[in-house]
């Protein structure tokens, strides 16, 4: 029975470890070097693009909601003391 070695889906080198997920760069597993060089920067770029889109689309709407909402000041009421 022969054991087939897994290969990096980006650089095609033999994986000596378990490998890491290569999403969003590629399907399958990747080596540590490709993970650091390609996959992590691609994931960070996607997160930054998503956050920039959320800020540009949702920020004015969130401000309008806060302006239109009536906010009452917090008042603290104490319960009357119990009679002994």
Image (cartoon, rainbow, N blue to C red):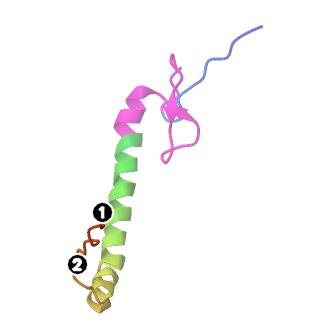
Decide whether the magenta segment is chiefly helix, strand or loop. loop
Q: Residue furthest top?
A: 1
Q: Residue furthest right?
A: 1
* Image x and y of residue 70, in percent: 29, 90
Classify the position of the C terminus by image quarter.
bottom left
* Image x and y of residue 73, in percent: 21, 82
Classify the position of the N terminus by image quarter.
top right
Q: Within the magenta stretch, is there residue 29?
A: yes
* Image x and y of residue 83, in percent: 30, 67
Q: Within the magenta stretch, is there residue 4?
A: no
**Residue with the mark numbered 1:** 84
The label on residue 45 is none
Element type at mark 2: loop
Task: Specify which label sits upstream in the sequence, 2 or 1.
Answer: 2
| Residues marked 2 and 1 touching at CB (< 8 Å) | no
The residue shown at (51%, 44%) is 23
- Of circles 2 and 1, which is in front? 1
Q: Is residue 27 toward the left or the right of residue 56 in the image? A: right
| Vertical relation: 78 (above or below) 61 | above
The residue shown at (58%, 42%) is 27
Q: Between 65 and 55, which is closer to the camera in this rendering?
A: 65
Give the residues drawn in magenta, as a range. 11-38
Element type at mark 1: loop
Q: Is residue 47 toward the left or the right of residue 81 in the image? A: right
* Image x and y of residue 65, in percent: 33, 86
How far, Cα to Cα, is label 2 from label 1?
28 Å
**Residue with the mark numbered 2:** 75
């Amino acid at each position: 029975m022969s054991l087939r070695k897994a290969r990096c889906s980006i650089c095609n080198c033999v994986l000596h470890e378990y490998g890491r997920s290569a999403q969003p760069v590629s399907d399958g597993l990747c080596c540590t070097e490709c993970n650091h060089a390609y996959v992590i920067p691609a994931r960070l770029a996607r997160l930054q693009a998503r956050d920039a889109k959320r800020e540009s689309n949702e920020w004015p709407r969130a401000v309008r909601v806060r302006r239109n909402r009536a906010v009452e000041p917090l008042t603290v009421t104490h319960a009357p003391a119990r009679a002994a």
